[in-house]
Amino acid sequence: MKRLDAPVARTYSGAASAAGPLLFVRPTRRAKLGEWVRIEGEGQQDRRGQVIDVGTEITVIQVFEDTLGLRPAEAAITLAGETATTVVGKDLLGRALTGTGAPLDGLPPSIGEARLPIWGAPINPVRRQHPSDFIETGVSAIDGMNTLVRGQKLPVFSAPGLPGIELAADIVENARPARGEPFAVVFAAMGITERETETFVSRFRESEVMQRTVLFLNQASDPTIERLLTPRVALTTAEHLAFTHGIHVLVVMADITHYAEALREVAAAREEIPGRRGYPGYMYTDLASLFERAGVLKEGNGSVTQLPVVSLPDGDMTHPIPDLTGYITEGQIVLSRELHQRGVYPPVDVLPSLSRLMNAGIGEGSTVPEHREWADQLYAVYARGREAKLMAAIVGSEGLAPGDRRALDFVDAFEKKLIHQSRTRRSLLDTIQIGWSLLETLPRDELTRISDTAWESRGRDDASTEVPR
């Protein structure tokens, strides 16, 4: 006797119409949003699809493969009765997979521990714990100036030609939590090239971080709908590792812009009324369904932290994608084209960058007691130097006040010694020491953000200032 909850497949003869990658079928009984579909055409290879809209008279199916040669009226359309699911488990660590979880490394498919739906939900606010633990990325501009905190959503705002994805790959290699707790990385790449795919796989294997990393690599040649599934498959995997096995998981998603463009493409095929710049009006809600799956549970040991990469179209911070992302997430790391052109890596512009949860993850017991004062003073001097640089272009450096000239010199030293670190990993303690060495070049009376206690304790290598491991 068949179980009541067992999936029941239903086959329909012919579609009412087609438009690009979409099939419109009617009527369909008990169709479910996200349900898998198989499309059979006479003399053609079967195609895969997914239900993306359910109505009383019409069901819309997104076809994954090319629809060239498919005759909608003669196709056999089977609704499998199952929504999109993915295999999850600790044995996925060390694997390179496609955007939908199929093997990409030549190994057999993972058996896993369970098969879960990919359409997860945000963490219940009542069960959510406020983020408070520091994650060391190995990048001074982030660890020192815009600290990443466990359970946070901190996007990287890049632009065409800037190394946003390269920075994300560096963080995958170098990130680690405090106190040596269980840690893993889930890397979800969307819309990347074949060359980038090979680069990521070979790079992570050579750096020996592959054993704690799961790679989901969606290529530009893959079907558009798979680009919408990739981050959800990755987040489902991360949630299982975090909340079932108690692992602290960092999810890196690159590139959110490619995801949003796929969302716009599907919306256009469905002839939906466009919103800003042609993107669907529900893009905010859709992005929130991804970003809000980060967090820490009060009763659990694991956590999910997100570091999405967003390429700014034409470098425009007001574009709908970064604009909406900024509303949902807790800050941003902004990459600078000017710094990149001057050979500074990573080219992080610390002035527009922000980590709204930084104060929760720094200070005594997390990083170093004087971390907040240290960062505030570096910000203040660097901002003054940037303003002096603009003024010097008008009146010349000789026309500046002595304090402004010192701040002007500080700008170059700050960018070359603290921000620039090539591709080498730098501990937080090293970052703090470099910052103190820069501040020591200035008169003490100009360091108004530093208390006497913090100034006297700078550079001490004792238990009070040692970063927890």
Image: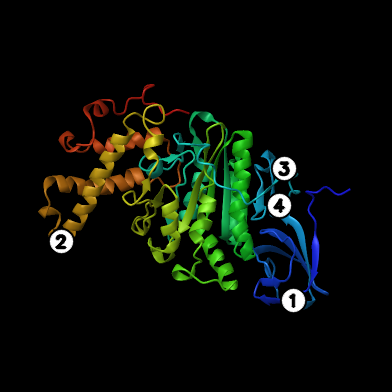
- Residue 2, percent from left and from top: 86, 49
Residue position for label 2: 394
Cα–Cα gap, marks 4 and 1: 31 Å
Asked if residue 399 can be seen in this view, the reply is yes
Cα–Cα gap, marks 3 and 1: 36 Å
Badge 3 density bin: few <14, some 14–19, many ≥20, Cα 10 Å: few
Q: Earlier in the sequence, mark 3 or mark 1?
A: 1
Instruction: Choose mark 4 or mark 1, whichever is in front.
Output: 1
Q: Earlier in the sequence, mark 4 or mark 1?
A: 1
Q: Amino acid at mark 2?
A: Ile
Q: Earlier in the sequence, mark 2 or mark 4?
A: 4
Q: Amino acid at mark 4?
A: Pro
Cα–Cα gap, marks 1 and 2: 68 Å
Residue 72: image tag: 1
Badge 2 density bin: few <14, some 14–19, many ≥20, Cα 10 Å: few
Q: Secondary structure at mark 4?
A: loop
Residue 150 lies, with reference to residue 6, above or below; the image says above
Q: Earlier in the sequence, mark 1 or mark 2?
A: 1
Cα–Cα gap, marks 4 and 3: 17 Å
The reply to whether callout 4 and callout 1 are in contact (CB within 8 Å) is no
Residue position for label 3: 114
Residue position for label 4: 103
